[in-house]
Image (cartoon, helix red, strand yellow):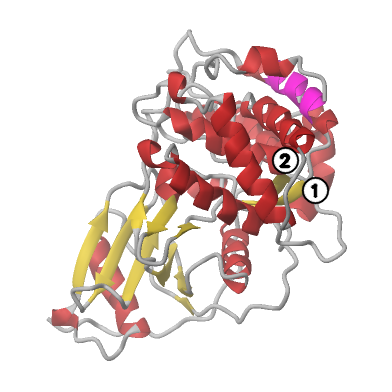
C-alpha cells in the first residue's frame, strides 16, 4: 500500500511547560541563576550542520504509519512494501522502531518516539545539540532528522549489554576508554557548570507542584529527601571533582558492544551535559547491581574499581598514573555513588526524586522503587575517607 507523502514543515520553536520555583528549595536557589548557562549548547570543535525537521507526529500506540512517512522522506528510494521493521522493547519511556530493507540492517533507520510528557523532564532541543556534539567527536551515530515527537538516527551495529557484561574486565576496559573519550570533550576556555543540582531542583519543583496522593506511606517525604539532598550537595561540592561533559545515564542497555570492531559506543543522550566526573562514573558503577533484579552484592569491589579507574585515567592522560591519583578518584566516585542518581535515575533503591516526579506524571511509570536504600557495603567507610 502506498504511503502518503509528508512535506517538511517549517520548524516551530518548542514551548516546554515551566514550573514556578519552590520557595522552600533553598539549596536550589543558585541553580536557578545558572540554569540557562548549564543547559546551553556545549561548545564543540565545529558547528554541526542543521538537522532536517519534518512535521510528522508518530502515534505511541501505532508507530508504523508515522514511521513509514518519515522513511519516505529519508529513504525515498525504498519501496514501502519492502521496508522491514523491528521493535525494540528495552526502552523505559521511549518507543523505538528499526526500519530497513536489507537483512544485514547495514542501512537501518531508527525511529524513536518520545514518551508522553517526558518534555517536562527532558530538554529535547538540548538533546539534539548533545547528539550533534557527540557525533562531531565520533561518539554518536548519524542524526537523520527530528519530528514533532521524536527523532530518527543511524542504527549502531552491536549488542546492548547487560549487568553481567559490564562486570567483565575485557568489556569494562572498553567502557572506561569510551567514557574517558567523552569526558575529554573540552569547553574551549569556558567554565561549564554541573547540571546535577539544577536538574534536581527541577525534579523537586515537579514533585511539589504535582504531588501524587497515592504515594506509599513508606516513601520519605519531599521535605526529608530535600534535606538529605542538601546535605549531599554540601558534602559533594567540596570534593573538587572536575566538571566534564558526561553521558549522565550510562545504563547497561545504553552501551553497545561491537565485537567485529572491538569497541563500545554509548547511546541515548537525553541527559548528556556537563557534570561532575565522579558522578558519571559512580552512576555507572551502580548499574553493576542490575536494574530489574537489584543485587548490591554485585556493586564492584575495590579491586575492580581501581582497575577500571586505572584504565580510565590512563586513557584520559595518555600515560601511567600514580596510585594516589587512582585512589583519590576512587574515593570521589564512591561518594558520588551515594547520590540518588537522579539526572536520569533508573535503578531501584537510589532514584527517589526521579521516581517521585515520574509517579506524579499521571502514573505513567508505576514500577519505580522509591525507597532510599544503601548501595551495598561500600558507602560508609568511603564517606569518611579523607582525600
Q: Which numbered tag is attached to residue 198?
A: 2
The secondary element bearing badge 1 is classed as loop
CA neighbours of label 1 inside 10 A, class few (<14), some (14 to 19), many (20+): many
Q: Is residue 224 visible?
A: no
Image quarter hosting the N terminus: bottom left
Using the rendered view, name the quadrant where residue 196 is placed: top right
| Residue 177 spot, x, y in % from top left | 58, 54
Q: Which numbered tag is attached to residue 193?
A: 1
Magenta segment: does it hold 227?
yes
Q: Is residue 298 visible?
A: yes
N-terminal label among 1 and 2: 1
Q: Is residue 110 left or right of residue 186?
A: left
Image height of 349 relative to 149, above or below: above
Residue shown at the point (34%, 76%) measured from the top left: 70
Image height of 213 relative to 329, above or below: above
| Residue 11 spot, x, y in % from top left | 55, 76
Magenta segment: does it hold 336?
no
Residue range corresponding to the magenta coloring: 226-236
Residue most extreme to the bottom: 77
Residue shown at the point (86%, 55%) measured from the top left: 191
Residue shown at the point (63%, 60%) measured from the top left: 126
Q: In this orientation, which residue lies closer to the viewer: 193 or 259?
A: 259
- Asked whether the residues under the numbered discs 1 and 2 touch, taking CB atoms below 8 Å apart as contact, a structural biologist would say yes
CA neighbours of label 2 inside 10 A, class few (<14), some (14 to 19), many (20+): many
| Residue 166 spot, x, y in % from top left | 44, 41
Distance in Å between CA atoms under marks 1 and 2 = 10 Å
Chief SS of the magenta region: helix
Q: In this orientation, which residue lies closer to the viewer: 336 or 194?
A: 336
Amino acid at each position: 500500500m502506498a504511503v502518503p507523502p509528508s512535506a517538511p514543515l517549517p520548524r516551530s520553536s518548542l514551548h516546554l511547560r515551566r514550573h514556578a520555583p519552590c520557595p522552600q528549595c533553598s539549596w536550589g536557589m543558585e541553580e536557578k541563576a545558572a540554569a540557562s548557562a548549564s543547559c546551553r549548547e556545549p561548545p564543540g570543535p565545529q558547528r554541526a550542520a542543521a538537522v532536517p525537521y519534518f512535521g510528522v507526529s508518530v502515534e505511541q500506540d501505532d508507530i508504523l504509519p508515522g514511521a513509514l512517512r518519515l522513511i519516505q522522506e529519508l529513504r525515498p528510494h525504498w519501496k514501502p512494501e519492502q521496508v522491514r521493521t523491528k521493535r525494540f522493547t528495552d526502552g523505559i519511556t521511549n518507543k523505538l522502531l528499526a526500519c530497513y530493507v536489507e537483512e544485514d540492517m547495514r542501512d537501518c533507520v531508527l525511529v524513536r518516539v518520545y514518551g508522553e510528557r517526558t518534555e517536562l523532564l527532558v530538554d529535547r532541543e538540548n538533546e539534539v545539540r548533545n547528539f550533534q556534539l557527540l557525533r562531531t567527536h565520533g561518539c554518536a551515530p548519524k542524526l537523520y532528522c527530528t519530528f514533532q515527537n521524536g527523532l530518527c538516527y543511524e542504527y549502531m551495529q552491536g549488542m546492548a549489554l547487560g549487568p553481567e557484561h559490564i562486570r567483565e574486565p575485557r568489556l569494562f576496559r572498553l567502557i572506561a576508554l569510551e567514557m574517558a573519550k567523552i569526558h575529554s570533550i573540552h569547553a574551549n576556555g569556558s567554565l561549564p557548570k554541573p547540571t546535577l543540582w539544577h536538574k534536581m531542583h527541577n525534579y523537586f519543583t515537579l514533585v511539589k507542584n504535582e504531588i501524587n496522593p497515592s504515594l506509599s506511606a513508606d516513601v520519605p517525604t519531599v521535605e526529608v529527601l530535600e534535606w538529605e539532598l542538601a546535605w549531599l550537595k554540601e558534602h559533594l561540592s567540596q570534593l573538587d571533582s572536575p566538571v566534564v561533559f558526561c553521558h549522565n545515564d550510562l545504563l547497561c542497555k545504553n552501551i553497545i558492544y561491537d565485537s567485529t570492531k572491538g569497541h563500545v559506543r554509548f547511546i541515548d543522550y537525553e541527559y548528556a551535559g556537563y557534570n561532575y566526573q565522579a558522578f558519571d562514573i559512580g552512576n555507572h558503577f551502580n548499574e553493576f547491581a542490575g536494574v530489574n533484579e537489584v543485587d548490591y552484592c554485585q556493586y564492584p569491589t575495590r579491586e575492580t574499581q581501581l582497575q577500571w579507574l586505572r584504565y580510565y585515567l590512563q586513557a584520559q592522560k595518555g600515560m601511567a598514573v600514580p596510585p594516589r591519583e587512582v585512589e583519590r578518584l576512587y574515593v570521589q566516585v564512591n561518594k558520588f555513588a551515594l547520590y540518588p542518581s537522579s539526572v536520569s535515575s533508573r535503578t531501584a533503591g537510589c532514584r527517589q526524586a526521579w521516581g517521585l516526579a515520574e509517579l506524579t506524571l499521571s502514573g505513567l511509570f508505576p514500577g519505580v522503587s522509591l525507597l532510599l536504600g544503601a548501595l551495598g557495603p561500600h558507602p560508609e567507610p568511603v564517606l569518611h575517607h579523607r582525600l
